[in-house]
Amino acid sequence: MPNTQARSSKLDLRLTPEAKARLSAAARERHQSVSQFVLSSALERADETLADRQHFGLDAEHWSAFMAALERPPRALPRLERLLHEPTPFDPPDAA
């Protein structure tokens, strides 16, 4: 399904003549403009990069362990608790 959103942002690249020639040759093979080729290739790579940060799958055993971990009450972390209650340099001075 084609994207019907208007393109309103621009991305400029500086590249070597050799890199530009490779991109042009690849775009010709796909019957696309260099811009179309670069954009579609970059978006595919972005989707691959972000996929494991957006979705993950677990088998039944690991899913059960994951759910059990979520259902357990939080453990006490006294050092973290103390840190969160200590004054910071950004706190206003006490009005005495």
Image: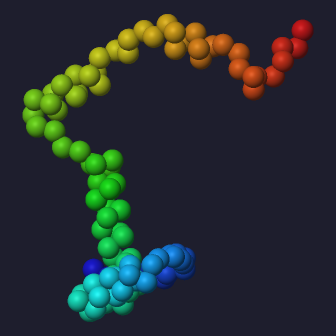
Looking at this view, is 45 or 82 the one in front?
45
- Left or right of 89? Residue 24 is left
- Left or right of 6? Residue 41 is left
Count up the numbered dots: 0
Q: Residue at x 32, y 56 (%)?
A: 49
Q: Residue at x 23, y 45 (%)?
A: 56
Q: Is residue 96 above or below residue 40?
A: above
Give how far across and how far down residue 91 sits, in percent.
76, 22
State the quadrant of the C terminus: top right
Give how far across and how far down residue 62 sits, in percent.
15, 31
Specify the farthest residue to the left. 60
Q: Is residue 46 above or below residue 18?
A: above
Looking at this view, is 45 or 4 the one in front?
45
Q: Residue at x 36, y 86 (%)?
A: 21
Visible residue check, residue 3: no
> Would you identify the image quadrant in which residue 27 lies?
bottom left
Looking at this view, is 21 or 41 the one in front?
21
Visible residue check, residue 37: yes
> Would you identify the image quadrant in which residue 24 lies?
bottom left
Looking at this view, is 4 or 83 the one in front?
83
Q: Is residue 50 above or below residue 34?
A: above
> Would you identify the image quadrant in which residue 68 lies?
top left
